[in-house]
Amino acid sequence: MHDGKALQNGTSHNFGDNFAKAFGIQYSDKTGKQQYVHETSWGVTTRLIGAIIMVHGDNSGLVLPPKIAPTQVIIVPIAQHKEGVLDKASELKDRISKVARVKLDASDKMPGWKFNEYEMKGVPLRVEMGPKDIENNQAVLVRRDTREKLIVSLEEIENKITEILDLMQVELLEKARNSAEEKTYSTTDLDKFIEIANTKPGFIKAMWCGDRACEDKLKEVAGVTSRCMPFAQENLSDKCICCGKEASKLVYWGKAY
């Protein structure tokens, strides 16, 4: 996350038939006999939503990756009371709807109010268009993530919107990955491990022998817990960071919510 703490995402829990027995949840097996169901829990829905907010959001609100944004483009007409502005904005909405999920805000709220509202909601791209833009056959595109403004000809607006949304998706992922990499450290020395844990937010890669006592000790002396054991293993050392015994598993350690 932004502050270097770990957020636990999807995990699997085998509940067995404990809850099934408590609530009487049964099914008929192939012999017709009633059996209690076996349940699992994966915990990925609200946790992933929280992760999206915390990884990409800023002080103005949400910053949603375009592929998951319910509304990808919001059209805000400027001086919409003037003749032809809403008609042109509606026409533009119909065109954009062929390449993106788009809405037109024709409410009587001021443009500045609308800007803030859709920035807070994380809509990836804003389209501004007023009388002067219509006269010049153009519109202003504003990215939510960088606040960059682009003046685009109406003749090429569909292609430009597609291009920007694709670029935003790539750049948001790259930014998140870079942030995680910048906050990830490696060490084979326990004193250095403790120093990093106390002074640098993020993950620490270190070897572990697999003994629960060592994990408990690291939590006691450094305030960290094991966060994950990656499939792509690295061999930083043959010794456990805590006890010095033989170790073959690299673990990401960190502080969590």
Image: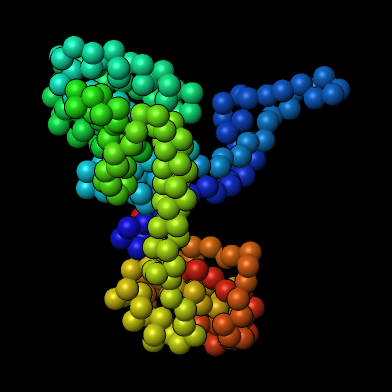
As displayed, is residue 191 above or below residue 20?
below
- In this view, the residue in front, 231 or 26, is 231
Task: In the displayed orientation, state which residue is furthest to the front.
Answer: 136
Q: Is residue 171 left or right of residue 61?
A: right
Q: Position of residue 116 (x, y in %)?
A: 19, 35
The reply to whether residue 247 is in sight is yes
The reply to whether residue 256 is in sight is no
Q: Position of residue 165 (x, y in %)?
A: 43, 40
Quarter of the N terminus within the rendering: bottom left
Q: Position of residue 256 (x, y in %)?
A: 38, 59
Quarter of the C terminus within the rendering: bottom left
Q: Residue at x 40, y 57 (%)?
A: 175
Q: Residue at x 42, y 63 (%)?
A: 178
As displayed, is residue 6 above or below residue 237?
above
Q: Residue at x 23, y 17 (%)?
A: 85
Q: Is residue 39 left or right of residue 110?
A: right
- In this view, the residue in front, 215 or 88, is 88
Q: Quadrant of residue 164?
A: top left
Report the coloring of the rendering: rainbow
Q: Quadrant of residue 81?
A: top left
Q: Quadrant of residue 154?
A: top left
- In this view, the residue in front, 60 or 149, is 149
Count of numbered circles in the view: 0
Q: Residue at x 29, y 39 (%)?
A: 151
Q: Position of residue 54 (x, y in %)?
A: 34, 49
